[in-house]
Image (cartoon, rainbow, N blue to C red):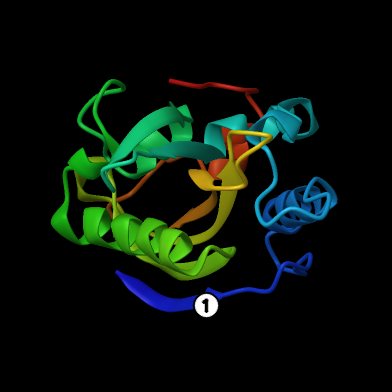
Amino acid sequence: MISHIQTLDKKPISHHAAFLSKLSAHWVSILYNRQFPLSSAFRPENFAKELGLLAMINVNEDGSFSNRIIGDIVGERLALKNAGHSIEQIEHDDTRKSVMRLINQTVTEGMPVLAEGSVTGRNAMEQSFCALSLPFSRDEDNDKLAIVMIGFRFRLLQHASLVNVQSHDQMAQNGPHLS
């Protein structure tokens, strides 16, 4: 469930999650006087250790969404049924509604959106999250929102029954993992 959501200006953010600040600064640096930066201008090599924390969602002409790329940490933490399933098919209703709210607000506003809250992942693990959602264009000649990229930061909420669960930072250190 989202506890805070905010549409942002097209300026870099300073956030306690360094990855989200770095992602925001990169997005601003590739805007080049466009409404939305080109997805082809995004440099994944700048985020090699964080690729598992990224999701790229296509915004289809009919208003639906389809997966472009879902990082493995995102898929695990959001409890996607399997790697091939759409972001709209997240197992837990509250988690799916939170992610869809973030995507929809980014599409509606056409601006970056920052959200914080909690989600339920696999094995009913509740975790807090911060997410930065960024709009991208796909076509150099048509500056139209076509892709939403979301960078996540997850933290498990403390429960006495959880033992030996890796933090997202530990998982990200293992390198890029994309589904």
Residue 62 image position (x, y, % from top left): 26, 43
* Type of the residue with mark 1: Gln
**Which quarter of the picture shows residue 156?**
bottom left
Residue at point 61%, 31% (across, down): 51
Camera-nearest residue between 82 and 60: 60
Residue at point 75%, 33% (across, down): 41
Task: Please tell me whether mark 1 sits on a helix, a strand or a loop.
Answer: strand
Q: Is residue 77 left or right of residue 152?
A: left
The residue positioned farthest toward the front in the image shown: 141
Residue 93 image position (x, y, % from top left): 15, 56
**Which quarter of the picture shows residue 1?**
bottom left
**Which quarter of the picture shows residue 17?**
bottom right
Quadrant including the C terminus: top left
Residue 175 image position (x, y, % from top left): 65, 23
Residue at point 55%, 75% (across, down): 7
Residue 9 visible in the shown view: yes
Q: Is residue 140 left or right of residue 167?
A: right
Residue at point 69%, 74% (across, down): 9
Residue 6 image position (x, y, % from top left): 52, 77
Residue 157 visible in the shown view: no
Camera-nearest residue between 33 and 69: 33
Q: Residues within 10 Å of mark 1 (few under 14, many from 20)?
A: some
Q: Where does label 1 land, which residue?
A: 6
| Numbered-mark total | 1
Camera-nearest residue between 84 and 173: 84
